[in-house]
Image (cartoon, rainbow, N blue to C red):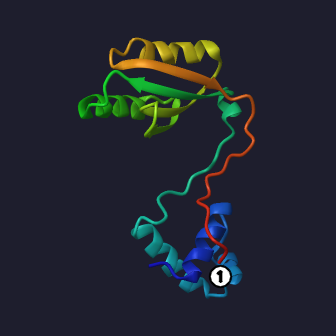
Amino acid sequence: MLDVYDQKLLVLLQDDARQTHDALAEAVNLSATAVTRRLKRLRREGIIRREVALVDPAVFGRTLRLVVNVMLQRAQTPLVDAFRAAMQAAPEVMECYNVTGRPDFVLMVLVRDMSDYERFARAHLMNNPHVREFESLVVINTCKYSTAVPQDEV
């Protein structure tokens, strides 16, 4: 169970995971030792899954983002599992969601350009006998992007 100190630490880390334990301790009114203990526990329990650097995709020439809705021929477990595995292996797929509603999957795809997307679509969607149809939505601009889990004020 998370207490108010754990919640405050998580809010702070989601904003900047490079903060020192001393800075975090000061921000939440704990000792640096207590913060270190708490962070170790949060990592061990899987509450903090990973700590990563968010890199500008343009650095690697990946400037075209698409939302792709995918409908399978049938929503049978082996087909769903096979498609999920294929998307997990595709480096262009940044996010993959198995959803309810009309599409079976919603993908967030990041590629260099439309030719790159066409190669991806041919390899993973057009020539996949289990894909009935797919719809590609090109992202014009990103109005909001966040990796932080929303929390109530603590």
Which residue reaches farthest front? Answer: 101
Q: Nearer the viewer, residue 102 or 85?
A: 102
Image x and y of residue 17, in percent: 63, 63
For the question of whether residue 15 can be seen, the reply is yes
Instruction: Identify residue for label 1.
Output: 25
Q: Residues within 10 Å of mark 1 (few under 14, many from 20)?
A: some
Vertical placement of residue 133 versus 87, above or below: above
Question: Residue 126 occupies which quadrant of the picture?
Answer: top left
Identify the residue shown where x is 39% and y is 69%: 45
Numbered disc 1: secondary structure: helix
Q: Position of residue 127 (x, y in %)?
A: 39, 11
The kind of residue on which mark 1 rests is Ala
Quarter of the image that includes the C terminus: bottom right
Q: Is residue 16 visible?
A: no
Residue drawn at (46%, 30%) of the image = 103
Q: Residue at x 55, y 77 (%)?
A: 6
Q: Position of 16 compared to 41: left or right? A: right
The number of numbered badges drawn on the structure is 1
Give residue 131's position: percent from left, percent from top: 38, 19
Foreground residue among 103 and 112: 103
Q: Quadrant of residue 9?
A: bottom right
Please give left or right for residue 15 compared with residue 72 in the image.
right
State the image coordinates of residue 1 (x, y, percent, origin top left): 44, 79
